[in-house]
Image (tube, grey):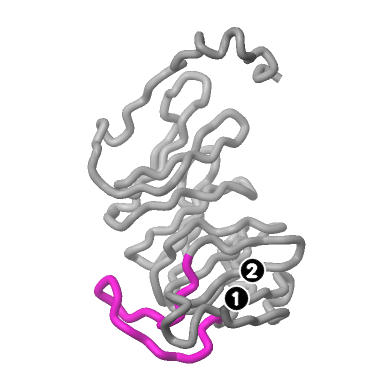
Amino acid sequence: TALAKIHKANVNRLGAAWLTSLEGGAKSGNNQSTAVAVNGVLFIETAQGRVHAVDGKTGAVKWSWNPGRGGQTRRGVAVGEGKVFVAQIEQHTLHALNQKTGAPEWHFTTGGRIDSPPSVWKGRVVFGCADGWVYCLRARDGAMVWRFRGAPKWDRHMAFEGLESVWPVSGSVLMEGNVAQFIAGRSNFMDGGLRFVKVDVETGSKLVETSV
């Protein structure tokens, strides 16, 4: 690969290939995401909540999508099955965009904030939610395959100007083979601790549950 041409003798001569200012170079907002590179294209979610596809060779913006509202910390996108998946956190909604054009293809609204991009697995997307549930949707059209309640009870509390589960499922769901793994809860020292759960991705049935 081209990376093999980089070595100790020439690494100090590396320089920027291009610079693209997204959002007019805005410096405000919170962002904890990194770009996802697929087939020479970088897919980026900005702190304003907008998604951009950028040509990796030239830095030219191929397409942009504006959800109309941003604000909370952004954590990036997932790419797979010909789509770009991004959570509109404040609207409790997961969006699927066409990977080539950025056109919206479907969206799915849950009962709470979705703070991280989904995991893509064999034609499905799996993600956790602040309502205490883990959702598995069909990537093609957003139809729900199953959902699993990670929260042990229906207890709710106020957070981010809305009701959320005392045991939210935050962060991306970890996929290992046919097993989805996640944590439900806020702290080891509150509400009986955190719950570590493993679920069969095919069926949504529980395999393992441990309090930590």
**Of 87 and 169, the residue lying toward us:** 169
**Residue at figure coordinates x 72%, y 76% from the top left:** 203
Q: Which residues are magenta?
A: 150-170
Q: Quadrant of residue 208 in the image?
A: bottom right
Q: Quadrant of residue 162 in the image?
A: bottom left
Q: Give the percent coordinates (x, y) of residue 117.
A: 50, 56
User: Relative to 47, is 77 on the left or the right?
Assistant: right
User: Relative to 166, is 28 on the left or the right?
Assistant: left
User: Do labels 1 and 2 touch, CB within 8 Å?
Assistant: yes
**Residue at figure coordinates x 30%, y 57% from the top left:** 72
Callout 1 amino acid: Phe
Q: Give the percent coordinates (x, y) of residue 103.
A: 46, 46
* Residue under label 2: 181
Disc assigned to residue 196: 1
**Residue at figure coordinates x 44%, y 78% from the top left:** 131
User: Relative to 31, is 194 on the left or the right?
Assistant: right
As measured in the structure, the alpha-carbon distance from the residue carrying label 1 to the one carrying label 2 is 7 Å
Q: Give the percent coordinates (x, y) of residue 93.
A: 42, 64
Q: Give the percent coordinates (x, y) of residue 20.
A: 36, 25
**Of 11 and 62, the residue lying toward us:** 11
Dot 2 falls on a residue whose secondary structure is strand
Say if the magenta span includes residue 44: no
**Of 154 and 86, the residue lying toward us:** 154
Quarter the C terminus occupies? bottom right
Q: How many marks?
A: 2
**Residue at figure coordinates x 44%, y 75% from the top left:** 187
